Amino acid sequence: MSEEPQAASAVRRIRVGTSGWSYADWAGVFYPLEKPRGFDELAYLARFFDAVEVNLSFYRPPSARMGALWLRRTPPGFEFTYKLHQRFTHERPPAWTHSHVAEYKEGVEPVRGAGRLGAVLVQFPWSFRADDEAFRHLEAVRRDFGDLPLVVEVRHVSWTGPQAIRFLKDTGLGFCCLDQPLSRSGVPPMTLVTSPVGYVRLHGRNREAWFKRTTQPGALRGGSPDPPRGKPEPPPLCAAGQVEDPPWRETRRAKLPCGIKRDAGRDERYNYLYREEELQEWIGRIHEIARASQKTYVFTNNHYRGQAPANALQILSKLRGGPVPVPAPLLKEFPFLESIAAEGPPPGGQGELF
């Protein structure tokens, strides 16, 4: 087989989407501002992407009924990745029971049974370092959930060492490659594949907000699923390099030159719009990951004000080598997307709503 068909085959195994889809500040940016009767956000998103990451399952056990409804509301080729519930990742020492495991598995079964469960993301905080205790914790997760396609997201640089990588490969646990603000103790951008599933998450590079200390009880450093609250530290740089006014300064409402709006509040750490050259850095990495895996998922998590779908569509266009459908509200919010926007409406419709 020639190199070109192999590359094309690898691209077809890549799925691109966003981390979550239910955000109030996407109204009028990604979704229509005035939503028609019966409007379905998930069905709408599935017209532009072929996968989505389920955030809700981190905070509460997944619902089998809800999963069955999601299947009806999306095309047959659309896939879901779920986050593992925080009980299994953020409570240490581990204290879950067989009933907790059964509850989670029952919740994802409709999607898994339909062949549309891409992966289960086992997401740990920065404080989870590669040592014997952590290895035992992951072995317990694999013992109870090994029949699901598990991918581990870790934040500490100790997981990039040879012992940790060998452990992940030997246990068949996938590795989530991250884009996050760089630090000496954080995981840098990588192209590591340790299982049949390749996985990429782009969190943004809002360094000031990402490493901001918080006084919240039990707060976790370095991008925990719970964003920090309270008054932010020094104002972050927006994607085009201008300094944004602090989000607590409510007297000025003018739109920033880079298209990012103020008042990000508790979601400030995800307030980042990737520049094209920053995304281009990842295209080569994504191709490399796809060549080493059976399937690859790429999700943008810089969700504030619809920046995640904007960047995800740019990635999709770069991977496909051509224009892609872009929703009208997003094109209005981010005019630079005009260069990749396909003519005409996206394929498919709302799907089965009820």
Image: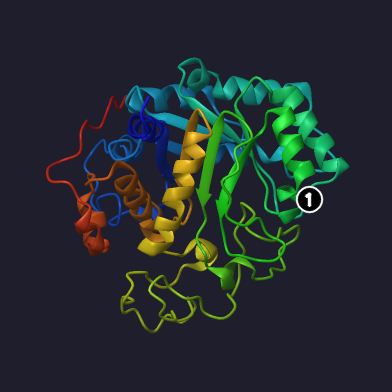
Query: What residue lies at 39% left-to-right and 30% top-to-bottom?
Result: 6
- Asked whether residue 19 is in view, the answer is no
Q: Give the structural element (helix, strand or loop) at label 1.
A: loop
Which quadrant of the figure has residue 182?
bottom right
Q: Which residue is mark 1?
A: 129
Give the image location of residue 159, x and y in percent: 73, 48
Q: Is residue 181 above or below residue 88?
A: below
**Looking at numbered disc 1 in the image, what kind of residue is underneath it?**
Arg
Residue 147 appears left or right of 38? right
- Judged left or right of residue 289, residue 279 is left
Q: Is residue 97 left or right of residue 66?
A: right
> Where's the C terminus, which quadrant?
top left
Q: How many residues crowd mark 1 within 10 Å: few (<14), some (14–19), many (20+)?
A: some
Measured as percent of width and height from the top left, residue 177 is found at 57, 47
Identify the residue shown where x is 44% and y is 81%.
243
Could you say where residue 254 lies in the image, as x and y percent from the top left? Answer: 31, 79
